[in-house]
Image: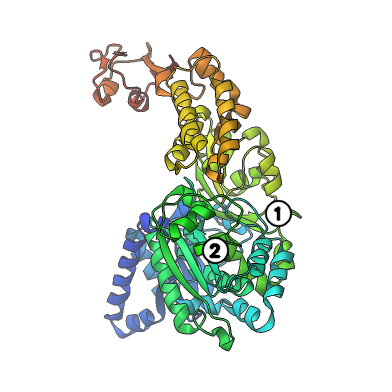
Amino acid sequence: MSTGKWRIVIGEGSCGIASGAKKTETALRALLNEAGEKDAKAAKAAKAVKLEIAGCVGNCYLEPIVDVYRDGALMARYVHATEDKAAAIFEGVLDSAPAAQNDSGSAQNDDLISDEDAEVLSRQQRIVLRNAGVINPEKIGEYIEVGGYEALRKALTEQTPEQVIDEIKASGLRGRGGAGFPTWFKWDAARKAKGKKKYMVCNADEGDPGAFMDRSVLEGDPHTVLEGMAIGGYAIGADEGVIYVRAEYPLAIKRLTLAIEQAEKCGYLGDKIFNTGFSFHIRIKAGAGAFVCGEETALIASLEGERGMPRLKPPFPAQKGYWQLPTNINNVETFANVSFIIANGGSAFAAYGTEKSPGTKVFALAGKIRKGGLVEVPMGLPLSEIIFGIGGGIKNGKAFKAVQMGGPSGGCIPAALADTPVDYENITKTGAIVGSGGMIVMDEDTCMVDMARYFLDFTRKESCGKCNYCRIGTKRMLEILERITQGEGKDGDIELLEELAGKVKDGSMCGLGQTAPNPVLTTIRYFRNEYEDHIYKKRCTAHYCKALITFTITDACIGCTKCARNCPTGAIEGGVKKQHCIDQAKCIKCGRCEEVCGFRAVLRDEA
């Protein structure tokens, strides 16, 4: 990247663009053009300013974010930098005095990132995200300036394929897509498999609700994934790579396409890379967004133009994968670690994390958390440190109740286990899984029965239908959960859920079916009382399930009529300065009356 004078960098990942970053960029470009047309002094100052974009730095809750650099040094980070703030940012740069930081390092105004928010980044260890929000993902030159493709050069000119695999083995890198399988083992198996042609496939079919790790990496640093794939291709003997990315990620596809074109033009992809005998080409396959295609054999079927349905294993893809040829499949984050490992050595990566779960892991913090976004931390860090130390704790001062890890395939971990180290072994003991890295945080207002219903509804819809247990078992479990949340649960439902869950886990062929019951089993394990309350007491502990709550108006009502005026169904009756009442037959349990009442006269109670 350029180190000359001033650079204004606008974070334009999907989150930044959704928050208005494109409008901010347009406003800044207009100001830059106007300055260039003014007097000679202004024009000279404008020439010293470069306006660029970057991916998401991880502080999604602060978007749009605008960074101001001078001679390569970050001078100021503006947050919530909407288009109306563009003029102030630009004027500060032209005056060579952006409202940066004072001598103590504290922000001078509310437009700048606070010390507390800056700690969200400073408390992380970034390997996968090392370039996120820093370089322009659409310019290969900026990736090269931070050492891009040097690891590929090293692998091709200084190491044998076996030595590359040995380095990956020394790092202890495990697949970051969910299973946590040793990466070197898969590479070694594919290398030893017989076949004149082999494939290296990147699984970018990120489908977990609340997960956006892979998308952000592809949008913010696509070349690190391409470089990792090329190194992997060299290691296993593949000359072709395919990135299977969900079509709902248009920005990721756009930047990947551009990155591939640039890498080919510069000779980092294509034929005889670095004047060696190694050739490697990469193409993109846009998937239709089927969750089951995250399973590698279903992904392969989709690549071949078939319906995305899993196949029996063995044979494994390393022996017979894409077109029945040896194929290795890793996810985006796994490949994004490879260039760091080859450039710095496996021991440098293994220095982070734990003995059995080395390295760092990227997590997407979502749900009822104050500082939602991306974080990358060493494996083994306690859950509490991620949620409270980095994520800032729970919104609106509510109590932390649980966190769903591993998406629909994972499970709910209760607040009582908040000190659990986040690594493959310890998270598995809780009944959840690390998964691809989604963390959906829940507060005291979350109904755990309804949460289980939500995730099971997702997996039931996403089932390919090939297995009877998965196709029918998840539907029957969902029907029971729906009855319970509607106040129609009955004695024996909990036991029936547990029995069905066991059969679905044991009888399903692929990971989707085998893990689909996890949210149900973990919520029963840790929040059985909520199931019992729903079934036997006909009440929702979290006051969430509409069928199990009722709204009443107490004698604290002064007859202001605000609740009646805001009721969408006209269910509230009463005159001015007279106590109102709710017609329960008309009430749809929307809670609007409770929201607008300024006298706390509306009581939410169990039916």
Dot label at residue 102: 2
Dot label at residue 357: 1
Q: Residue at x 48, y 48 (%)?
A: 292
Q: Position of residue 258 (x, y in %)?
A: 41, 73
Q: Residue at x 72, y 65 (%)?
A: 169
Query: Which amino acid type is marked by label 1?
Result: Ser
Determine the secondary structure under disc 1. Answer: loop
Q: Is residue 101 visible?
A: no
Task: Look at the image and tell me in which quarter the C terminus lies.
Answer: top left
Determine the secondary structure under disc 2. Answer: loop
Circle count: 2
Disc 2/disc 1 C-alpha distance (Å): 41 Å
Query: Which amino acid type is marked by label 2?
Result: Asn
Please name whichever residue, 375 or 449, is drawn nearer the observer in this view of the structure.
Answer: 449
Please name whichever residue, 468 or 169, is drawn nearer the observer in this view of the structure.
Answer: 468
The disc, 2 or 1, on the residue closer to the chain's N-terminal end is 2
Q: Residue at x 53, y 38 (%)?
A: 516
Q: Residue 48, relative to residue 456: is it above or below?
A: below
Please name whichever residue, 204 or 145, is drawn nearer the observer in this view of the structure.
Answer: 204
Spot the residue most to the bottom. 275
Q: Nearer the viewer, mark 2 or mark 1?
A: 1
Q: Is residue 291 left or right of residue 229?
A: left
Q: Is residue 61 visible?
A: yes
Q: Residues within 10 Å of mark 2 (few under 14, many from 20)?
A: few
Q: Residue 511, relative to residue 601: is it above or below?
A: below
Spot the residue most to the right. 355
Q: Position of residue 573 (x, y in %)?
A: 25, 14
